[in-house]
Image (cartoon, helix red, strand yellow):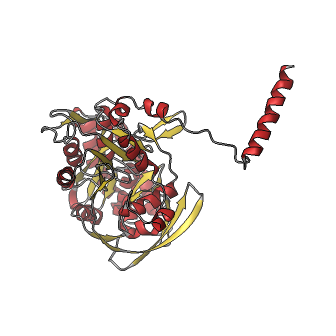
Amino acid sequence: MSKFKKFLIAALFIISISSSNLYSKSDETYDSLRMMIDIMEIIDVNYVDETKPKDLVVGAINGVVRTLDPYSQFMDEKAYKEVKTETQGSYGGIGLRITMQDNVLTVLTPMADTPAYFAGILPDDKIVKIDSTATEGMSSDEAVKLMRGNPGTKVVLTIFRPATKQELVFELKRKDIKIETVKKQMIENNIGYIRLSEFNAQSAGDITKMLKDLSKDGMTSLILDLRNNPGGLLDSAIEICSLFIPEESLVVSTKGRDKIQEQHYITKKKPLYPNMPVIILINRGSASASEIVAGTLQDYKRALVIGGNSFGKGSVQTIIPLSDGNALRLTIAKYYLPSGRTIAQRTEKKDIKRGLDPDIKIEVSPETEGKLYIQSEKIKLKDSDKKEEETKITDEALETAVLVIKSQKTEEYIKHPDKYLQDNPKPEMEPENNKSGDVSKEEKKITDEQKTEKTK
């Protein structure tokens, strides 16, 4: 028996013992491992270049993990260290949150005030190449490695934009990424506005402080903007929900294969703002913890949700440290909102349906969303000069939220979302060839004559 085969049998025997103990499928596992060993030995003997057993085993592990879902990943020692570095809040990079969607490297959202943000990269953009390396078959973990680097160095991204079917090239200079996650502003009619770009350990405390400051300034209602917020810490989402819903209310539950993963997360303190009208803004870049906050307050009829469908990341990952400094990020459960619904992407009639359905749907193109995202750094709904107004893109979702609050019907629409459409019916779209009212009338006359002829 070759040294290679002995190495594989020793490595995979340990896996098989673990697998049989966990799942009692030892016979099936041994058969599969035997086939894997045979294939690897054929590669070792016949492949054009010399191979290393460890590299083949790691490659096999990566292949196994990729068959699970877009979020589970095998991380080598370097990748694991980088994940821990990111949670500390500072690293050299370009500021992109990415995920796998249909096995394609996809932008979840660019972070505010980063190179990717200012370059105009948008949610749902597909990353085709990083420098000269094609991303086909690449994991998000591998992509992160390539995109990160020392501040001041450059990286070139080739992007395919599904909305316009364009391939775009962005040359980005890396910088030290430090994220300001919360911003506030008082806008007209005593409406408080808070934009949260990420859920971290400080988010709940920051939002609580901002709410108190805005209340001192006369805030009587709140718009919480979670657009392009990719999520973060679950504890932070629970604390933010506890500001608005009763003590000991269920926020979210998790269910997995093992009953150990069945958990119920509840609020643990009395709400500071139990009655304040709340509107939450979401879009395709809102994921995970953002969807939990928006969906939970929607379930309890505590907030009106406005915008586009959210991303649909309704799964729980845990990082399991392995020997030699490696780690496995593994999906162990799915999130369920208080009503029992899941926020995960799902297939309905051959179409992919994104996570949360907003109460008031505002369809916006990815390009417009990207421009609004940049514009949101300088939100001004009053006292802006004419030049700014001329170049400003209308933020329909935000303006709809303001109009709802000014109409004093927020509570009514929260309880009966369909009432909004009854009160504000969408205008019928004119055909594109109707350039003037005269043409439209003439076409209507012809159509009426044709109908008369048919009835004769």
At x 17% / y 54%, what residue is drawn? 209
Q: Position of residue 419 (x, y in %)?
A: 43, 30
Left/right placement of residue 206 relative to residue 195 reads: left
At x 35% / y 33%, what residue is drawn? 414
Q: Position of residue 203 (x, y in %)?
A: 22, 54
Res 63 seen here: yes
> Which quadrant of the figure has residue 32?
top left
At x 38% / y 33%, what residue is drawn? 413
Q: Nearer the viewer, residue 27 or 86?
A: 86
Q: Is residue 159 above or below residue 272?
A: below
Left/right placement of residue 164 relative to residue 101 reads: right
Q: Specify the farthest residue to the left.
A: 269
Q: Is residue 231 above or below residue 339?
A: below
Q: Position of residue 60 (x, y in %)?
A: 39, 54
Q: Nearer the viewer, residue 297 or 104?
A: 297
Q: Specify the farthest residue to the bottom.
A: 152
Q: Quadrant of the C terminus?
A: top right
Q: Position of residue 305 (x, y in %)?
A: 37, 40
Res 13 seen here: no
Q: Nearer the viewer, residue 278 or 8?
A: 278
Q: Quadrant of the N terminus?
A: bottom left
At x 35% / y 80%, what residue is drawn? 152
Left/right placement of residue 157 relative to residue 187 reads: right
Q: Is residue 453 above or below residue 276?
A: above
Count of marks placed on residues: 0
